[in-house]
Amino acid sequence: MLPYVFRRLLQAIPILLAVAALIFVLFSVIPGNFATSQMADGRSNIDAATIARMNEQFGLNDPLPLRFAKYVGGLATFDLGDSFRTRQPVINLIGERLWPSLQLALAAMAFAIVIGVPLGFLAALKPGGWLDMLSMVFAVSGLSLPMFWLGLLLMYAFALTLNWFPSFGYGDGDPRYIVLPAIALGVSPLALLARTARAAVLEVMHADFVRTARAKGASAYRVMRWHVARNALVIVLTTLGLQFGSVLGQAVVVEKLFAWPGLGSLLVDSVTWRDIPAVQGCILTIVLFFLVVNIAVDVLCAVVDPRIKYS
Amino acid sequence: MKFRANLWIGATCFALVVAGGVFAPWLAHTDPVMDANLMNAEVPPGSEFWFGTDAQGRDIYSRVLHGARISLTVGIVSQLINTCIGVALGLSAAYWGGWWDDFVNGLTNMMLAIPSLIFALAIMAILQPGLTSLLIALGLTNWSFTCRLTRAATLSVKQLGYVEAARSLGYGTFRIMFTQILPNIAGPIIVIGTLGMGGAVLAEASLSFLGLGIRPPFPSWGSMLSDARDQISTAPWISIFPGLAIFLTVLGLNLLGDGLRDILDPHSQTRKA
């Protein structure tokens, strides 16, 4: 197992490098840079000499391949460059935001799993029954809801009207602050998980080994627990890993709405300021997250289903 | 032929939104951008203003109708671009194989690793906010699933007899790709395209909400919601209707996609045959 994990981590490196190169090229084709965009937006008045000095200071006059080589060299030592805006190392900026971001993503996924998976299982037990109909209507609605709108409605209902939860902010780790953003972010993965779990259970229930298990007289509970659930879980796990990527993407909007100090709001702020080192750092961190989660999911699949072998 | 509830409900929702967008100039009561009137600011929904008015006194009903034009344009056009890119790459990679296939696979894996909303956000940072930029940003970032699907489907049909026959008749490569292979694998591509359109509508709303898409005063549902946030405690109706419009559009497209999948899914066709 360990060599497999190691090899998968190695395979993630070229993807990360390709993403870094892509972002690098994207941001070097824009006319103008951090210094000139300050003027264009009227945020400050900078003369030509200052622009030249800033370009020199940030190394923006070097040719593109050289800049990229320097950047990749820095990546090897976890140096993501300095933020244009705050002049701090980007790695420190990201470090501050990492934990809140992880908290929110994990809370949203936990909410989605705890409700979505059992809902899908229960729905599949009686296809066409009232619970099945209700949960599938709920699932297709959940997939169509804009998360920030749901967030706004939750804010209005539970924060401003009922006063059960604070309406926005981080609250220094006070758990009441995470509830509303986690629900807003978790509803769409919840819906998808419920649908996937239902489909997986229905598929497995018609498999030959389930019929055999029933025929040899295994109790309904035993069949569900050992034959259906375990096999269905592998499909659910794979969806879970892929869904994590879109949760990381959507988190940008939810974090902004709830003023949650995560990577997403850092990314949006950096984008509006054209603080390119910070944008690059945020995107690379998010991609790394996503790759690591998917490797972890593949390993978990092998734990749940011993038939999956990694050589 | 049994009655397919999801297909018909989805088609009805989507048709309603399309009709609202197409006939917006006739259905709307006021001009969505110009008719600001501070005397009418934050009027609750009623007989004069069906959906109420916003902080600048603009009629939300008219703005929601005009917003459909932006959402649908972005959804349809950007998804068409995605489908074209995905089909062209997937079809050629599977048909030609070799280094081109490896290259396309590598590209697809990279695209799958970047959450598409984040990638679109990065592109919007480079371009100026506006409709064209949105079409580019959303059109270039969501083709990886279509590409994978097209590639897999092409691989499975390219060895079949009718492709072989076309080749022996001396058909050119492109003629085989587009007249022999593509029509036979179009079903799942249409399904993915329909579902992706819903995703594009959501993505446009998200980007506009963040202030990186359509900029105010133009009536994008996303930017209307972004304005509404500041008035949520005094005028909640400003938040309700643009969000409902997004929900209706995306729900329609999702149901339509599910319904089409039941019809166009290749497995169900083989079962019938």
Image (cartoon, rainbow, N blue to C red):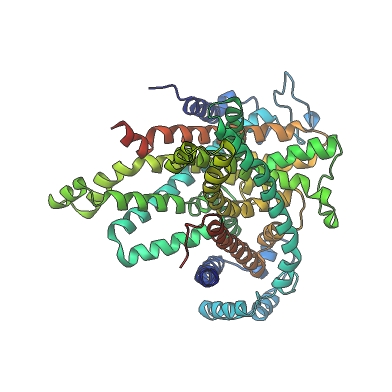
Quadrant (top left/top right/bottom left/bottom right) for the C terminus of chain B: top left
Position of residue A178 relative to residue A127, above or below, is: below
- Across and down, in percent, residue B20 comes to 55, 28
- Which residue extends farthest right? A163
The answer to whether any part of residue A155 appears in the image is yes
Quadrant (top left/top right/bottom left/bottom right) for the N terminus of chain B: top left
Q: Is residue B212 left or right of residue B231?
A: left
Residue in the foreground of this view, choosing between A134 and B30: A134
Residue beneath the point at 69% across and 40% down? A149
- Which residue extends farthest top? B47
- Which residue extends farthest front? A216
Residue in the foreground of this view, choosing between A146 and A183: A183
- Across and down, in percent, residue A282 comes to 65, 64
Position of residue B103 relative to residue A225, above or below, is: below
Residue in the foreground of this view, choosing between B232 and A114: A114
Q: Is residue B228 left or right of residue A11?
A: right
Residue beneath the point at 33% across and 58% down? B93
Residue in the foreground of this view, choosing between B73 and A283: A283
- Which residue extends farthest left? B169
Position of residue A49 relative to residue B115, above or below, is: below
Q: Quadrant of residue A114?
A: top right
User: What count of labels does the image hold?
Assistant: 0
The answer to whether any part of residue B67 appears in the image is no
Q: Quadrant of residue A131?
A: top right
Q: Is residue A106 left or right of residue A5?
A: right
- Across and down, in percent, residue B199 comes to 54, 44
- Across and down, in percent, residue B57 comes to 75, 32
Position of residue A301 relative to residue B161, above or below, is: below
